[in-house]
Amino acid sequence: GAGVSQSPSNKVTEKGKDVELRCDPISGHTALYWYRQSLGQGLEFLIYFQGNSAPDKSGLPSDRFSAERTGGSVSTLTIQRTQQEDSAVYLCASSFAGYSNQPQHFGDGTRLSIL
Amino acid sequence: DAKTTQPNSMESNEEEPVHLPCNHSTISGTDYIHWYRQLPSQGPEYVIHGLTSNVNNRMASLAIAEDRKSSTLILHRATLRDAAVYYCIHPLTGSNYKLTFGKGTLLTVNP
């Protein structure tokens, strides 16, 4: 009966390094979402997956950000050449389908700190 | 998500009911109303959602006004664990997978 699982829970890295964040959605959920939340700020949408396809990646801030999803399950968000402004909590959510009558279930996020 | 209006903060005592209001005057006929909450250092947690009729689940009840321009989240007996920021949203039809939270209502529960 696991919920959405994200790893690592915390990541501290130096500016310029690459990082990889992982999300394990709820089994059977076809839709998967990545958001980020900066301290005291609201939720910022990054990308939406339906199955392994990403029909909307409009929220990715720059070409340093990429994400993939394999087997309709696990997703990885990769940030290349990290910058200090990338510091935030990265949240993953999943839902049964990508419609507004389907609630999204969130993981507890990865807290990313760039030194 | 379109704009919703919620009080910045509310206070309740443990084991008392809590009514959290939300105004969403620009809601369209097909937009669902969702409530989420977020405890410190945790991801947002889905609470309840509805379209027109009042809804109940194990966590809360959602009362939707007849004109759908406002709704109220009801916690029947507040516990200390209910202390959180509560967000009322109505994802726009057509981009309804993009959740956007405003400032929400910070609920404090006194023992």
Image (cartoon, coloured by chain):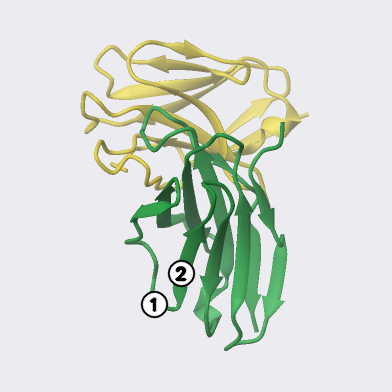
- When asked about the image quadrant of residue B17, the answer is top right
Front residue of this view, candidates A52 and B65: A52
Given residues B21 and A9, the one toward you in this image is: A9
Secondary structure at numbered mark 2: strand
Residue A78: give x, y in percent of width and height.
Answer: 54, 70
The residue singled out by tag 1 in the image is A63
Q: Residue at x 72, y 65 (%)?
A: A10
User: In the rendered image, is residue B89 in sight?
Assistant: yes
Instruction: Identify the residue shown where x is 52% and y is 80%.
Output: A80
Would you name the residue on which mark 2 appears? A66
Would residue B47 appear left or right of B34 to someone viewing this image?
right
Please name the color used to draw chain B: yellow
Crowd band around label 2 with a 10 angstrom C-alpha radius: few (<14), some (14–19), many (20+) = some
Q: Is residue A69 above or below residue A81?
A: above
Q: Chain of mark 1?
A: A
Amino acid residing under circle 2: Ser
Residue that appears at 53% across and 64% down: A38
Q: Which chain is green?
A: A
Say if mark 1 contacts mark 2, CB within 8 Å: yes
- Residue B4 vs residue A6: left or right? left
Residue at the far bottom in the pictured view: A16
Task: Give how far across and how far down residue B79 sits, in percent.
Answer: 72, 25
Find the distance from the CA under tag 1 to the CA under tag 2. Answer: 7 Å
> Picture coordinates of residue B50 (x, y %)?
40, 20
> Split into 4 quadrants, where in the image is the N terminus of chain B?
top left
Q: Chain of mark 2?
A: A
Q: Nearer the viewer, residue A62 or B9?
A: A62
Query: Height in image: B78 above or below A95?
Result: above
A32 and A113: which one is in front? A32
Check if mark 1 and mark 2 are on a common chain.
yes
Q: Which quadrant is home to the C terminus of chain B?
A: top right
Q: Amino acid at mark 1?
A: Asp
